[in-house]
Structure formats: C-alpha cells, structure tokens
Image: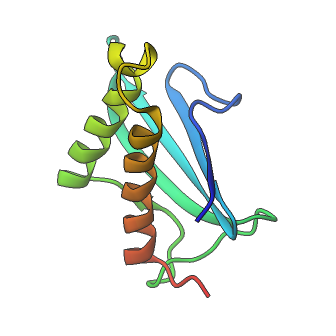
Amino acid sequence: MNYKLELRTPDSQPKLIFHAITFDAFKVNIVERYCGVKPLLCDVLFRVRTLDNQIINRKDGHVKIRIKDEDLEIYQRLLKVFKSYDYKNKLISRRDAEQDFVHFFLRLVIMNYNLN
C-alpha cells in the first residue's frame, strides 16, 4: 500500500501539532496537544477521512480515537525517532522509521474502523 507521510503540516502551532498519512484510499489526520510551560505531550487524537475529506465513523459510531496507555508510549517512542540525531543525519534508515510509524497507525485503523 502506498502512503505519503506529512509530519508537522503547515497548520501546526507550538501547542497543537498536526500530522497526516495519506494512503491510496483514505487518510489519517493526527493531532498532538502539548501543555505546560515546558511543553509535554498531553493528548494524541486521530481520525480517518476519505480522500475527499469526508469523515469515516468508527465501528462504534464515534469519529476520533484518543491514543492512550501503552499505545501512547509506543507513539512517543516512534515519534522520538524522528527527532533523533541518527534520523536527522541519515545514520538509520528513514524508510524503516517511517514504515514503523505508518504500521502503528494502520494497526489502530484496522482495529477500530470498517473500511469498505
């Protein structure tokens, strides 16, 4: 499956950061909320849309998913790779790091959405 990963889309601000993953048939919009004087990650939400921006409902009828508990820890670890010295200086495979991030979200999408 082809994808395009956009980290920190142009709408991002210091306390609200937006990411997007666009696949062949749908896209995932990710919102990170930071709080406090020393910005700490408080909340991560994501939703799935069609390519023409229609929101897709989850299996239970809701729209957004809040990433929490061990999924939040995994998310933070995956995000930390993108900020690392090794990633920035191409000492590790960028493609592998991006694929790990995308596969994490694909797993969450498959678990929570009916994509027909």
User: Which of the two residues, 100 or 53, is positioned nearer the viewer here?
Assistant: 100
Q: Is residue 11 left or right of residue 91?
A: right
> How far across and how far down the image is residue 45, in percent?
45, 51
User: Which of the two residues, 41 or 28, is positioned nearer the viewer here?
Assistant: 28
Q: Residue sitting at 37 percent across and 76 percent down?
A: 111
Q: Classify the position of the N terminus by image quarter.
A: bottom right
Q: Is residue 55 left or right of residue 70?
A: right
Q: Quadrant of residue 104?
A: bottom left
> How far across and how far down the image is residue 63, in percent?
54, 69
Q: Is residue 73 left or right of residue 14?
A: left
Q: Quadrant of residue 105?
A: bottom left
> How far across and how far down the image is residue 23, in percent?
64, 61
**Residue ranking furthest to the right:** 52
> How far across and how far down the image is residue 65, in percent?
43, 62
> Is residue 84 among what the camera can see?
no
- Looking at the image, residue 26 lies above or below residue 61: above
Query: What colouring method underlies this structural image?
Result: rainbow
- Looking at the image, residue 17 lies above or below residue 90: below
- Looking at the image, residue 35 lies above or below residue 20: above
**Residue ranking furthest to the bottom:** 116
User: Which of the two residues, 23 or 40, is positioned nearer the viewer here?
Assistant: 23
Q: Classify the position of the C terminus by image quarter.
A: bottom right
> Is residue 29 among what the camera can see?
yes
